[in-house]
């Protein structure tokens, strides 16, 4: 194989720190080894989460006691009574009075205000009869009918009837009629009052039930603020502990950041002289162009097999007769046996077309 062979180029570069840096770097590495030998810092031994504040626990106990205790049950029952329309004790009316209002009833007789009115009217009629009307009838009888007679009795009965009719029956009828009309007029307002009371119960129910809870929530909010302040203290203690635990490592890290860097260096590079390597050079270019090289065994000397193969062909070291430069390649005679199309004879010397192999 022809051509000047080239071996693999090996370059060795050594970079050393600036001489003035060496002492500081060695000190930093020694300190790092010492810190590593100490092991990892221990975990923070204090509390990491603040406990409930006493005001929070008090609010929690009060809330539980209220919700599960008799007070809430009683308030709920009262609110539900208002919700279902129980007006007794809320409007000032008894259940019977409420029923009369809704039905438009007028109660008369004993125990009602109308009894006194009836008594007053009756007394007025009697007083008018005995004090005015009947004495006048008797006076006329004595004057015009001294011996008496049925006419006087008729006049007396008529006077009594007229007095009762005018002074008692008619006023009572007007009074009871007015009371009835008034009672009928109160039915709708009474029903509206009941609706309003139900609405009031509906509105008051959540407020009544939640009022104590709101107070306990306010107490709990104070406790949360106090617990948050306690947590801030714990966080500060933990931050201080972390700072102190990592102070040496951080100081060393800062130290090494300052003393390392490209402050100057010494570089030594060694590149061996490449040896002739025709096979490597040619193989690197195969496939891109046909390469024709004189490879006839008869123009070579000092032929030594390397023990390696290329495309199934033995590779040899040799030199051309009359040229001492060492070379590597194949023998045209072996190529001709395996790849005859790749061998051409020129001026009696066999050449190998490496691009055809």
Image (cartoon, rainbow, N blue to C red):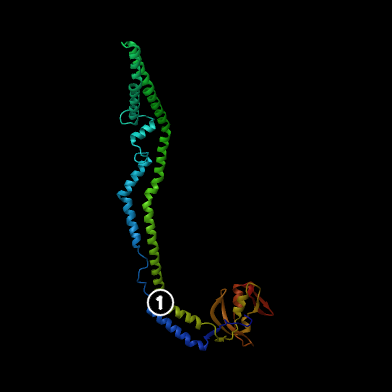
**Which of the two residues, 41 or 198, is positioned nearer the viewer here?**
198
Instruction: Name the residue furthest front.
Output: 143
Position of 97 compared to 314: left or right? left
Q: Quadrant of the N terminus?
A: bottom right
Position of 302 compared to 46: left or right? right
User: Quick one: label 1, few (<14), some, or many (20+) residues within 10 Å?
Assistant: few
Residue beneath the point at 40% across and 79% down? 36
One can see residue 318 in this view: yes
Q: Relative to 246, say whether 94 is above or below.
A: above
Q: Position of residue 201 (x, y in %)?
A: 39, 43
One can see residue 330 in this view: no
Residue beneath the point at 34% across and 31% down? 113
**Which of the two residues, 55 or 148, is positioned nearer the viewer here?**
148
Secondary structure category for the residue under label 1 = helix
In terms of image quadrants, where is residue 32? bottom left
Q: Position of residue 43 (x, y in %)?
A: 37, 72
Q: Position of residue 239 (x, y in %)?
A: 41, 72
Residue designated by label 1: 244
Total marks in image: 1
Q: Relative to 245, say whether 171 is above or below.
A: above
Instruction: Name the residue furthest bottom.
Output: 19
Position of 146 compared to 342: left or right? left
**Which of the two residues, 177 or 261, is positioned nearer the viewer here?**
177
Q: Position of residue 212 (x, y in %)?
A: 36, 52
Q: Quadrant of the C terminus?
A: bottom right
In terms of image quadrants, where is residue 192? top left
Instruction: Name the residue furthest right.
Output: 347
**Which of the two residues, 146 or 18, is positioned nearer the viewer here?**
146
Q: Relative to 291, say whether 214 is above or below.
A: above
């Amino acid at each position: 194989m022809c051509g000047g062979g080239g071996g693999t180029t090996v370059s060795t570069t050594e970079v050393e720190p600036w001489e003035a840096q060496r002492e500081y770097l060695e000190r930093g590495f020694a300190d790092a080894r010492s810190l590593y030998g100490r092991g990892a810092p221990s975990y923070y031994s204090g509390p990491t989460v603040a406990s409930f504040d006493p005001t929070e626990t008090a609010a929690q106990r009060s809330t539980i006691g209220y919700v599960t205790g008799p007070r809430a049950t009683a308030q709920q029952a009262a609110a539900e009574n208002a919700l279902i329309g129980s007006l007794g004790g809320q409007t000032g009316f008894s259940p019977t009075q409420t029923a009369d209002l809704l039905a438009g009833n007028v109660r008369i007789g004993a125990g009602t205000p109308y009894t006194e009115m009836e008594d007053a009217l009756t007394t007025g009629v009697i007083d008018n009869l005995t004090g005015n009307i009947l004495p006048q009838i008797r006076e006329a009888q004595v004057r015009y009918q001294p011996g008496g007679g049925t006419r006087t009795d008729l006049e007396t009965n008529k006077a009594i009837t007229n007095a009762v009719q005018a002074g008692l029956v008619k006023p009572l009828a007007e009074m009871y009629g007015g009371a009835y009309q008034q009672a009928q007029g109160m039915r709708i307002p009474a029903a509206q009052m009941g609706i309003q009371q139900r609405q009031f119960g509906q509105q008051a129910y959540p407020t009544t039930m939640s009022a104590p809870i709101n107070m306990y929530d306010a107490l709990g909010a104070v406790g949360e603020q106090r617990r948050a302040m306690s947590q801030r203290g714990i966080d500060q203690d933990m931050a201080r502990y972390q700072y102190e635990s990592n102070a040496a490592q951080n100081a060393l890290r800062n130290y090494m950041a300052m003393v390392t860097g490209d402050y100057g260096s010494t570089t030594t590079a060694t590149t061996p002289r490449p040896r002739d390597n025709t096979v490597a050079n040619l193989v690197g270019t195969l496939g891109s162009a046909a390469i024709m090289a004189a490879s006839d065994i008869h123009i070579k000397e000092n032929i030594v097999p390397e023990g390696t193969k290329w495309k199934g062909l033995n590779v040899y070291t040799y030199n051309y007769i009359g040229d001492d430069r060492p070379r590597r390649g194949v023998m045209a005679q072996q190529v001709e046996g395996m790849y005859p199309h790749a061998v051409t004879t020129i001026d009696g010397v066999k050449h190998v077309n490496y691009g055809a192999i």
